[in-house]
Amino acid sequence: MGAELAVHPQPAGQIGLSHFADVIVAKLELELGVWVIIGRAAVLNGDHDPQFVTARIVHDANVIIDNISLWSHGSTRHCLAVQGTLKSRRPETVVLACNTFSGYVESGSLIAFKVDDAVP
């Protein structure tokens, strides 16, 4: 079997984040099958106070595949990585979403590899 690959980088520049509202950074449309999905984003806590910075891979309108939240000191940047597998029986939309109280995200990307099977 040949490998199938889906990649979506964030457009160049920064996307503002505020009030812990999830912002979609990258989106993939995946065909049915079994997928290994990897995402990453640089998230800056632009507030002077410590806050959580979060990245997650989500599908099917709010089903979380993977999630990471870090406690971030004021005015610091973190590269957050998320990964997981998805067994889809129909085409799926998968997104990388990030949030913090006040800051921005940049360099976000999602990559998915279609595989024969994935064992939990």
Image: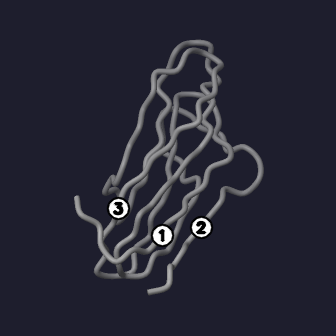
Residue 52, relative to residue 13: is it above or below? above
Mark 1 element type: strand
Task: Say which quarter of the image contains residue 32.
Answer: bottom left
Q: Residue furthest bottom?
A: 1
Q: What residue does disc 3 label?
A: 85
Q: Among all residues in the image, which is located at the extreme right?
A: 12
Mark 2 neighbour class, 10 Å CA radius: few under 14, some 14 to 19, many 20 or more: some
**SS state under label 3:** strand
Q: Secondary structure at mark 2?
A: strand
Asked if disc 3 and disc 2 are in contact, CB closer than 8 Å, the reply is: no
Q: Quadrant of the N terminus?
A: bottom left
Q: How is the image coloured?
A: one colour
- Quarter location, residue 41: top right
**Relative vertical location of residue 109 with respect to residue 87 in this rendering, above or below:** above
Q: Is residue 58 left or right of residue 107?
A: left
Q: Amino acid at mark 3?
A: Thr
- Amino acid at circle 2: Val
Residue under pointer 1: 113
Q: Amino acid at mark 1?
A: Phe
